[in-house]
Image (cartoon, helix red, strand yellow):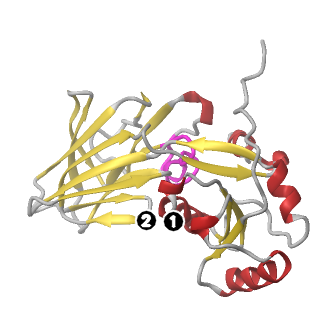
């Protein structure tokens, strides 16, 4: 059996590099070091953006410059750094020139609140629904127009992309998904009834609709990565193929390999 095809290599220009950093000390120190060595251009003029921080910051950077379609090379100055490369001061331009691209398609969340307002946001990792009070949430889940779960009593539920499957999704016992699988995970968070339901794997084209039952007594918030909307009554989630992000990785630590390793982690 032949190995799965890799994404075609993109030649990354390195003569116009922007460097951005999170606002904590480690990242700001790294920003000063790299800017002194390599100089930098403004993000709106760059061929590639180097993001210094943690996973949350690289996600913010991808969303901030989505209209530019510029690739982002993250270097870890945070804690976990699953989406990041190692931080090194030397050889940055050479690393960018040989970096392997990975195109990610986000989820689009369309959340309607109790006052009738509609809020839209993109999520690279997951869209999650969470109870806002001590009382469990009650959710009705519809997939492609068919009610699949009339009532889920739980702390919440989430829909995860393959890239996000090793994040919050994994922590609530959701499955790890290879990037090439073109599926997404629908995972309950602390399900009380039905107690044995562990979620579902859905095709990437699926349209998922959550209706919050008894929303006044049991309020629920919806979050697309780090964008939260409170007091929602309905949430629609689908993959947005019209939008895309491109992350760059050192060849020896590409994202596909990291996700594979997570499945064999002790």
Quick one: 198 or 36, which is closer to the camera? 36
As drawn, the label of residue 226 is 2
On the image, numbered disc 1 is attached to which residue? 60
Q: Is residue 171 magenta?
A: yes
Residue 179 in the image, given as x and y percentages of width and height: 61, 36
Q: Is residue 173 magenta?
A: yes
Instruction: Locate the N terminus and report the quarter of the image it occupies.
Output: top right
Secondary structure at numbered mark 1: helix
Foreground disc of the pair 2, 1: 1
Task: Give me the residue at 66% from left, 43% from top.
Answer: 102
Secondary structure at numbered mark 2: loop
Is residue 177 left or right of 86 when viewed as pictured?
Answer: left
Outermost residue toward the right in this view: 90
Task: Give me the residue at 75% from left, 50% from top.
Answer: 12
Task: Give me the residue at 67% from left, 65% from top.
Answer: 80
Quick one: 152 or 167, which is closer to the camera? 167
What residue range appears in magenta?
Answer: 161-174
Compared with 143, 220 (above or below) is below
State which tag comes first along the sequence, 2 or 1.
Answer: 1
Compared with 179, 131 (above or below) is below
Is residue 200 visible in the rendered image? The answer is yes
């Amino acid at each position: 059996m032949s190995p799965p095809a890799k994404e075609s290599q993109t030649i990354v220009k390195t003569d116009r590099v922007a460097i951005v950093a999170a606002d904590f000390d480690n990242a700001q120190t790294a920003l000063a070091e790299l800017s002194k060595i390599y100089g930098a251009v403004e993000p709106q003029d760059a061929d590639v953006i180097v993001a210094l921080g943690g996973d949350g910051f690289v996600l913010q950077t991808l969303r901030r410059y989505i209209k530019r379609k510029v690739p982002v090379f993250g270097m870890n100055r945070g804690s976990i750094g699953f989406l990041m490369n190692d931080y090194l001061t030397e050889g940055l331009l050479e690393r960018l020139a040989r970096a392997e691209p990975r195109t990610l398609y986000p989820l689009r969340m369309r959340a309607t609140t109790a006052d009738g307002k509609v809020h839209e946001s993109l999520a690279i990792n997951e869209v999650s629904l969470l109870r806002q009070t001590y009382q469990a949430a009650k959710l009705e889940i519809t997939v492609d127009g068919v009610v699949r779960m009339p009532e889920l009593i739980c702390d919440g539920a989430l829909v995860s992309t393959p890239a996000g499957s090793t994040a919050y999704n994994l922590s609530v016992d959701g499955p790890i998904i290879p990037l090439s699988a073109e599926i997404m995970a629908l995972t309950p968070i602390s399900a009380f009834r039905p107690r044995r339901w562990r979620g579902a794997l859905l095709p990437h084209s699926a349209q998922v609709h959550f209706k919050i039952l008894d929303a006044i007594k049991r309020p629920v918030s919806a979050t697309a990565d780090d964008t939260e909307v409170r007091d929602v009554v309905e949430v629609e989630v689908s993959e947005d193929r019209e939008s895309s992000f491109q992350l760059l990785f050192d060849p020896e630590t590409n994202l596909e390999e990291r996700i594979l390793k997570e499945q064999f982690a002790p």
